[in-house]
Amino acid sequence: MKRAMSEALNRYIESGYRKVDGWLSAIAIRSTVALDNLQKRLNISGAVSEIGVHHGRLFILLHLLTEAPEISVAWDLFELQNENADGSGHGDKRRFQTNLIRHGCDLNRIKINTVNSRTLTADKIIAECESKVRIFSVDGAHSAASTFSDLDVAVSSVCEGGLILLDDF
């Protein structure tokens, strides 16, 4: 049985995502929603998290798929662009926060971290997420070494039945 989608989620899926700078296709949205529905049917719960949120195009979708008390945790360089070795992203924290509000996200269940993902550990992610992660998006730096590091910590952070979404592989 499919669960009812919130009004904010429906609006975001229909057209809202197009108003957020970033990269996310309609088929990726449908696939992510279908996988979320499967997790819900299997009673898989936990935080959602993303490394490399940019302005939040995918993160907003992930958050709108959560239900209290699940939380959403963002990790990005934001104002640490001097550490952006491969020039990927250029996330803007203020624009990200504005987009969260514009699309009806529950800011009380969102944590935003300015960090170089190469310094993250699974223990730190799980502690910040207050649980293991059920959907983890890896979309940070685009070098092989950084992507491997991000995937390594994601694998150690997800719950049983959890998903890792990988962009720019």
Image (spheres, rainbow, N blue to C red):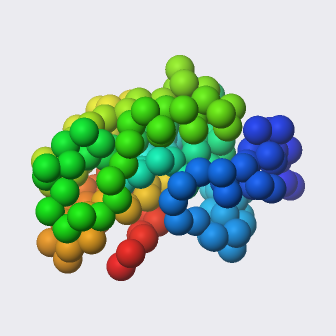
Pick the front one: 155 or 85: 85
Q: Quadrant of the N terminus?
A: bottom right
Q: Is residue 151 left or right of residue 149?
A: right
Pick the front one: 159 or 100: 100
Residue drawn at (21%, 49%) of the image: 81
Residue drawn at (36%, 79%) of the image: 169
Above-or-below relation of 24 to 2: below
Tally of marks? 0
- The image quarter in which residue 31 lies: bottom right
- The image quarter in which residue 30 lies: bottom right
Judge whether residue 160 can be spotted in this image. no
- Report x, y in % for residue 17: 66, 54
Pick the front one: 8 or 45: 8
Residue drawn at (15%, 72%) of the image: 145
Q: Is residue 44 left or right of residue 3?
A: left
Q: Is residue 155 left or right of residue 44?
A: left
Residue drawn at (57%, 38%) of the image: 99
Q: Is residue 152 left or right of residue 99?
A: left
- Report x, y in % for residue 161: 51, 59
Judge whether residue 150 can be spotted in this image. yes
Above-or-below relation of 97 to 38: above
- The image quarter in which residue 13 lies: bottom right
- Report x, y in % for residue 106: 61, 26
Above-or-below relation of 3 to 26: above
- Report x, y in % for residue 42: 66, 55
